[in-house]
Amino acid sequence: MIKKIIVSACLLISFASFAQQGTASPYSFYGIGDSRFKGTLEFRSMAGVAVEQDSIHLNIDNPASYAGLGQTTFTVGGTFATSTLKTNEQSEKAQRSTFDYLAVGIPMGKFGASFGLIPVSSVGYKILNDNTATEGATSAQLEGKGGVNKVYFALAYKIKPHWSVGADVQYNFGKITTTSIEAITGVQNTTSEVNTSELSGASFNLGTMYQTKIYKKMSLFTSLSYTLDSKLNSDNTRVITVSGDPDPYTYSPVSQKLTLPSKLTIGAGIGEARKWLVGTSMIFQGNGQLSNYYNQSSNVQYEKYAKYAVGGYFIPNYTSFTSYLSRITYRAGLKYEKIGLIVNNESIKDVGMTLGAGFPITGTFSNVNIGIEFGKRGTVSSNLVQENYLNFSASFSFNDKWFVKSKFN
């Protein structure tokens, strides 16, 4: 049954992921857009703290985790995102429904493998500069959409019962389209410029995880992963159209090679497996070279990304036969991020809190997860935009035994 579910979901979500507009942030104008992937919902609900080798939940952040899988696992997640964008003078609301990830993990003895499809970044903004009340002034409308997705394949190996290593290869691909329309008050003709960038490139990620008992039932969990810097090819096209002119002008600017920066993730936690865990994680990433020919700006610089998070979970009694509430996993976390962008000399930061719960499906190892994330990004200082967001997420994790030889005909 799970095989049919996986095939159907892969086909459906593969098409849907190309059509979605995954953000409404004006900050997605820069680079390759907003960073989308925050981990599977189980760990995202702990602010991204993913340090435990879990046997029934996929940890896509660290490829070494797949060696700890006990069953074949299929997981898919999505988010309904709401945000209020405000400046010192006005505010607007925005809503989006997005696909977050689709992945499959397969245990193979001391080995474990995984593959999946994940949106990496999204571009989605509409900005209007209206000066139509002033004769001779220029009004402009900017719009952007698209983003980058990735497919990946990972392999992990369990060196010792509590120590595993892994690696994955990722193919990044996508398309970003930006449209700029300008008009001068009192002049009939308008000018439209459409820029399209086709993006592609490969990247690699390495990881290791280790856990050990430190006191009676209490264990120490550690996680380390490193993503190598990589190139992203950008094939560019520009089309300029003047109203009244039936022949648009098309040309291809020089193709560029963008640089996706290296990333180091360090995590550690203490707890009792299937009972409770408290942990922390830190992510450090270089500033890369993500500016394309159409979104370069003199008031924008890129800095190193950094994230600090604390989070954990609690399960009252996962073996309870009499109380379903005791088998629910309760999760929470706090995060602080510097997203790697400086606009008008202001470093853009993201501060938020996460809450979540995992509901086991009775009679199986499968589960349904829900999560809430709320916080703010940006600031109203220096003529910038502050985003107050509230995201509702849901995911499904289906678990089953594959490759088990039947004992009866």
Image (cartoon, rainbow, N blue to C red):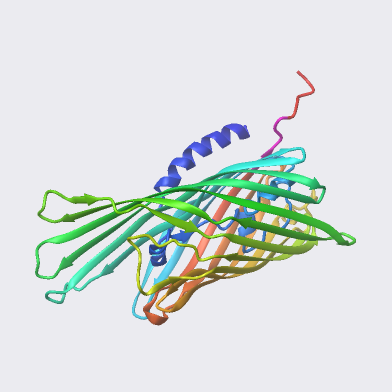
4 to the left or right of 54: left
Span shown in magenta:
398-403
Q: Which residue extends farthest right?
A: 216
Q: Give me the residue at 77% from left, 45% from top.
A: 158
Q: Which residue extends farthest top?
A: 409
Looking at the figure, which quarter contains the N terminus? top right
Residue 90 at x, y percent in the picture = 34, 76
Q: In the image, is residue 184 above or below residue 248?
A: below
- Residue in the foreground of this view, choosing between 257 and 352: 257
Residue 267 visible in rendering: yes
Residue 274 at x, y percent in the picture = 77, 54
Q: In the image, is residue 338 above or below residue 293?
A: below
Residue 73 visible in rendering: no
Q: Give me the residue at 56% from left, 53% from top.
A: 394
Does 219 lie within the magenta span? no
Residue 68 at x, y percent in the picture = 74, 46
- Residue in the foreground of this view, choosing between 142 and 317: 142
Looking at the figure, which quarter contains the C terminus? top right
Residue 230 at x, y percent in the picture = 52, 54
398 to the left or right of 98: right
